[in-house]
Amino acid sequence: MLCKLLYDVVPEKFHRPVIFSYGGRHMPREHKRSTGCVCNGIIYLNLRSMAFYGRHQYASQIAGIWREMLRVGFHEFGHVATERKWKGVTQKEYENCHNTHRRIERDAEKEAEAWILKILSCNGRLYQPDFLGVVDIIRRRHEQPLREVPRGSYFADRLQSYRCQITGGQLSLSDVAVNLHIKSYEKKLQIYGFIHKIADDLARVHVDSAGRSHHFWVWGDLPIIAQRLESSSKFERLRKEEEEYRENLKQQHVLLDMYDQRSGRQEGRGRPIQSPSL
Ligand SMILES: [Zn+2]
């Protein structure tokens, strides 16, 4: 599936042979631990590293791993697409110059995101298969069955994955908030409640044995939710309040710094905020 998507979406002039590796086997020695690389016109993708890095990124492990597989696959083709632009850069410069390195990687990432958006315009789940082939088989072999896992965050992860799998969802409420860059501290619950209000009609719902509803969304829902948020005056008000709260917090820290400097204190950043007598 990944092969087909890569070759369907990437323009033919950038096509290169792809070697899938598990755990760095058959990969160039210096890239054995990376998720992927381009070497001598061949693209290497390390399925094990992609599964490792992708599995805890989102509520659903399978959705996280699939997203990472797409990101890395297209990123490496992004390097092929932008190699002409960076033709004069030597391997040494790439490794030693932080700025050049960052710019080359950013260019490849941009290409990758554009290709992934292209897929999103055809399929809201990014053509995520139910099973991830060899990655899934090995992942399952190394993981304990759900009933044998005692408790803790690992259990919660597996439970979320299970719920996503049976509903066909990919993203939980907090995944949606993170992907829409809603980083809220003070108004978190209000904003979460608000997302529920405007996006529940798009969600896939799982009702657990205690009767609680768990909502999940897919990648294709994000642009619709973002649009609804933008056109809502209540969200605008919440965002303004959040900004004011952060501004206040910043000012209080500035006052504390001044107070510390005047009284010659170095520590004390973590103490409760009192009215400083300046
Ligand atoms: Zn790269």
Image (cartoon, rainbow, N blue to C red):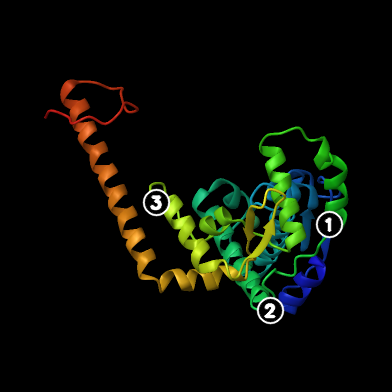
Badge 3 element: loop
Q: Amino acid at mark 2?
A: Cys
Residue on which the image places disc 2? 122
Badge 1 element: strand
Q: Amino acid at mark 1?
A: Phe
- Residue 82 position (above or below residue 249): below
Residue on which the image places disc 1? 20
Q: Nearer the viewer, residue 52 or 190?
A: 190
Ligand 1 shows up in which quadrant of the image? bottom right
Observer-side mark, 1 or 2, equals: 2
Identify the residue at horizontal 79%, vertical 52% (top origin). Answer: 47
Identify the residue at horizontal 30%, vertical 49% (top origin). Answer: 245
N-terminal label among 1 and 3: 1
Identify the residue at horizontal 46%, vertical 61% (top origin). Answer: 194
x%, y% of residue 64? 69, 55
Label ID, residue 187? 3
Residue 37 image-quadrant placement: bottom right
Q: Quadrant of the N terminus?
A: bottom right
